[in-house]
Amino acid sequence: MSTHNALMVDRVAPALSAAALGRVGAFDVSVKDDFAEIAPIWRAFQEGAQATPFQDFDWVQCWLDAFDEDDRPRLIIVLLHLGNNLCGILPLYETRHMTGRVVSWMADASSDYCMPLLSDAGLSAWQDGNAEAILSLASGHLPGVDLIKLTNQPADLAGKPNPFATFGRPVASGEAHYTEVGTPWKPFYEALRSSKTRSRLRQKWRRLAKRGRLVFRSAKGTEEVEAALIQIIDWKIEQLHERGNRNPFMESDGSRAHLTRTLLCYAHSGVVSGKRGLRIFGLYLDGKMIAGYASFVENGRISVFVNSYAPDLHTDCSPGLLLLVRILEFASRTGHTTLDLMRGGEAYKQDWCDKQVLLVDSLHPLTMRGRVMAGLHRLKLDLRHRLSSNPAAKRFILSMNKRLKGQGADAGGR
């Protein structure tokens, strides 16, 4: 008996012209696959939902636009209603691999945090077992699905266990790092760094300032933002290659990878101003950027997605670290409450952040083929964990990756 058939569900009328799937607990569940039609509903709902920048409609739109027309995946947009009120959006999609068919969160490979959009009312009405029942209904809408694979999920959602992170057979897949920003700036900074460290950073700033006009600022306008983003990505590609890390920004043939196309689309789309958008914080010397942080800024939170610095310029002054301090100061003085350095185990993230987000992959096979795929995914995560905890093995893998132009196993963060 399939999981779908084993569930007790009641049929309900369609909501928002969507195909009705059934009733799960207090929720009426329906599904849409027309992304353009859902746009105004999604945009309005996201303003008050529990979500991250990676559930922003514009980000998901850019992820979708980065596909070639013939390669666009099938979308499964699950809507949850309490009566007539929308209380949840589950942005899912189906991919077909040589090994089978998989349902996942939209933009999963391009996003640090994957999750549903839920209102406070939706969270309050949630009951144990709802996630499994809703996802089973959604997969039943697509006969032949082998695996529900939900990756990069925060273990907690609005201070409570994330119900989708406990679905199926969850496995830890990584961690993200953030810190709460305090005010006023001076006592916050003094508590964050020792007097010796603060003195050393001041000396580096002064030494760098003697080499030209040193300015911390944000890139302005779509064109400058796009140019700065390209520069940051190019620096990051060079750094990843030098270290031997996997390179998510460039294909093996030198073309821009899907993640890079998504980021450039997002920068170009004009969402760089207002409540949601991409902001480039830069350290400029005589008008030339020498370090940059591409960050999402929304709801009092600055989330750093990719950062890098000029590899051959002024590295003795640690421009990337100086820029991080300036961003923290900016956040403190402008009322931002959180600086999120997001996914990855890099030392500077652990050094500057005192809080962690456990990330979880949930795997629920629906067929024998799905069980094989889930087992292979768990083996990959286990291998990555073993490599990260074995310095000698990690150095060997990074060395081999470097010889293969960085196109190898993932042994580090972005």
Image (spheres, rainbow, N blue to C red):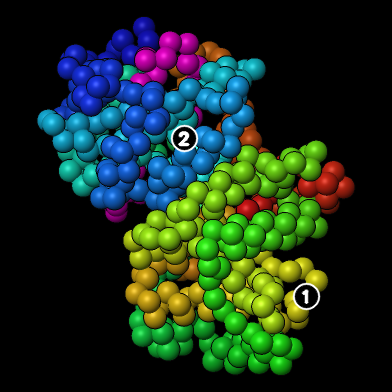
Q: Secondary structure at mark 2?
A: loop
Residue 262, image x and y in percent?
57, 44
- Is residue 43 depicted above or below 101 in this figure? below
Residue at figure coordinates x 29%, y 12% from the top left: 6
Please say if 122 is above or below 365.
below
> What residue sits right under mark 1 in the picture?
313
Asked which quadrant contains residue 343, the reply is bottom right
Query: In the rendering, at what x and y percent does residue 333 appear?
Result: 39, 80
Query: Looking at the picture, how far across and down is residue 286, in whole percent?
Result: 69, 82
> Can I make out residue 378 in this image?
yes
- Which is more toward the observer, 235 or 144? 235
As displayed, is residue 56 above or below residue 129?
A: below
Relative depth, front residue between 311 and 99 = 311
Q: Amino acid at mark 1?
A: Leu
Disc 1 + disc 2, Cβ < 8 Å: no
Left or right: 305 in relation to 92: right
Residue at the spot 54% in from the left edge and 76% down from the top edge: 217
- In this view, the residue in front, 281 or 9, is 281
In the picture, measured across the screen, residue 242 lies left or right of residue 143, that is right
* Magenta stretch encompasses residue 54: no
- Per the rendered image, the range of residues in magenta is 138-162
Residue identified by numbered label 2:
106
Which of the image's four quarters has the N terminus? top left
Mark 2 belongs to which amino acid? Met
